[in-house]
Image: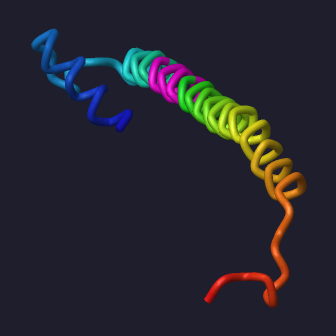
């Protein structure tokens, strides 16, 4: 990846690699390496933030689900508790 960026930089400026002194080549490669490493680091930071946001959204979604379902479950349980069940012998056939 660094080599591709290096070649693209030389091509953009219209310079042949053989024309440059070794110190300049090292300096260009070092600069490009720093930029690539910084870009990769930035990309990793963005990915971590996205993962964190997705995890938070999952937690929020399930919290809301249980928040809305709990009163409903409580009311259903209350109905079963309050409504008497007829014994089998009293049920009509």
Q: Position of residue 67 (x, y in %)?
A: 75, 33
Q: Is residue 2 above or below residue 24?
A: below
Of all residues shown, which one is farthest toward the top? 13
- Dividing the picture into quadrants, the one containing residue 25 is top left
Question: Closest to the observer: 14 or 32?
Answer: 32
Question: Closest to the observer: 84 or 66?
Answer: 84
Rendered image coloring scheme: rainbow
Which secondary structure dominates the residues rendered in magenta? helix
Question: Closest to the observer: 1 or 13?
Answer: 1
Residue sitting at 82 percent across and 56 percent down?
83
Q: How many marks?
A: 0
Q: Position of residue 82 (x, y in %)?
A: 88, 52
Which segment did they paint magenta? Answer: 35-45
Residue sitting at 44 percent across and 18 percent down?
23
Left/right of residue 60 with respect to residue 46 in the rendered view = right
Left/right of residue 37 with respect to residue 65 in the rendered view = left
- Dividing the picture into quadrants, the one containing residue 4 is top left
Question: Closest to the observer: 93 or 72?
Answer: 93
Q: Position of residue 65 (x, y in %)?
A: 66, 38
The image quadrant where one finds the C terminus is: bottom right
Residue sitting at 81 percent across and 74 percent down?
86
Q: Is residue 91 above or below residue 39?
A: below
Residue sitting at 80 percent across and 50 percent down?
79
Q: Is residue 61 magenta?
A: no
The image quadrant where one finds the N terminus is: top left
């Amino acid at each position: 990846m660094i080599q591709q960026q290096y070649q693209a930089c030389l091509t953009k400026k219209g310079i042949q690699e053989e024309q440059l002194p070794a110190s300049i080549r090292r300096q260009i490669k070092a600069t490009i390496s720093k930029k690539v490493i910084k870009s990769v680091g930035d990309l990793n930071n963005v990915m971590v933030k996205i993962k964190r946001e997705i995890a938070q959204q999952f937690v929020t979604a399930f919290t809301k689900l249980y928040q809305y379902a709990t009163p409903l479950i409580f009311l259903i349980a209350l109905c079963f508790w309050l409504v008497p069940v007829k014994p089998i012998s009293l049920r009509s056939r």
